[in-house]
Image (cartoon, grey):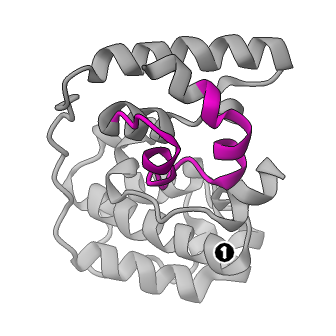
């Protein structure tokens, strides 16, 4: 049930998530714009095809395209299969679409690094640490990764909002109905 919920009720990803890609910080301005354009397209394609994003295009390929985009003016190469790190099969299957997206990225302004987020609500850090410890303990008991129990985005949102009852917990969009039903009472107990 939780797997279906994770895929079917997938929230729109935060555009600032591109900074989480290992190596994004080493890109120049043009590379960052291409990275954002390809990453955003990949996420939309994944949602449209109802697949995990990495099954459409993995981060290493996106990063490789972004790194090499510094050598392109306003046009990507005619054959994307010639780009180091781009598999020929992928270039043949997605080439025309991907070239349009890269071209759009080459013309776009680069993204700005987001301001560091801090816990603004009273008790944020205490709730966050309690939730992180709780999810780690439950994950160890169940023999799964802690993100399976409660994803980081849900931890952050719960810590920020500090829900005090079931109704307030229902307003936490990143939690999802299965996790709310399965862990809701425990979460409220942990953060009181």
The reply to whether residue 99 is in sight is yes
Q: Is residue 88 left or right of residue 180?
A: right
**136 displayed left or right of 41:** right
Q: Is 23 drawn above or below residue 96 in the view shown?
A: above
Identity of the residue drawn at 77% across and 12% down = 140
Instruction: Note whether residue 92 is visible.
Output: no
- Neighbourhood count class around disc 1 (C-alpha, 10 Å): few under 14, some 14–19, many 20 upward: some
* Numbered-mark total: 1
183 inside magenta stretch: yes
**Whether residue 88 is situated above or below residue 192 in the rendered picture:** below
- Left or right placement of residue 86 versus residue 69 in this view: right
x, y percent for residue 135: 62, 20
* Residue 54 counted in the magenta span: no
Mark 1, residue position: 91
The residue drawn where x is 85% and y is 18% is: 143
Report the span colored magenta. Answer: 162-186
Question: Above or below — where is 22 with respect to 72?
Answer: above
Position in image of residue 42 (x %, y %) = 55, 69
Position in image of residue 8 (x %, y %):
70, 67
Along the line of sight, which residue is nearer the eye, 50 or 19? 50
Prevalent SS, magenta region: helix
């Amino acid at each position: 049930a939780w797997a279906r919920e994770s895929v079917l009720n997938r929230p729109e990803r935060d555009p600032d998530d591109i900074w989480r890609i290992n190596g994004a910080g080493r890109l120049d301005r043009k590379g960052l714009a291409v990275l954002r354009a390809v990453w955003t397209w990949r996420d939309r394609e994944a949602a449209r095809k109802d697949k995990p994003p990495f099954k459409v295009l993995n981060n290493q390929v996106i990063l490789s395209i972004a790194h090499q985009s510094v050598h392109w003016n306003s046009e990507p190469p005619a054959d994307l299969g010639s780009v180091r790190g781009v598999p020929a099969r992928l270039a043949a299957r997605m080439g025309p679409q991907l070239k349009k997206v890269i071209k759009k990225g080459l013309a776009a302004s680069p993204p700005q690094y987001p301001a560091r987020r801090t816990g603004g609500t009273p008790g944020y850090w205490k709730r966050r640490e309690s939730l992180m410890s709780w999810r780690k303990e439950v994950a160890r008991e169940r023999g799964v990764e802690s993100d399976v129990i409660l994803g980081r985005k849900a931890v952050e949102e719960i810590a920020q909002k500090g829900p005090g009852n079931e109704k307030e917990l229902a307003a936490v969009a990143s939690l999802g109905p299965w996790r709310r039903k399965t862990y809701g009472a425990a979460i409220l107990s942990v953060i009181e």
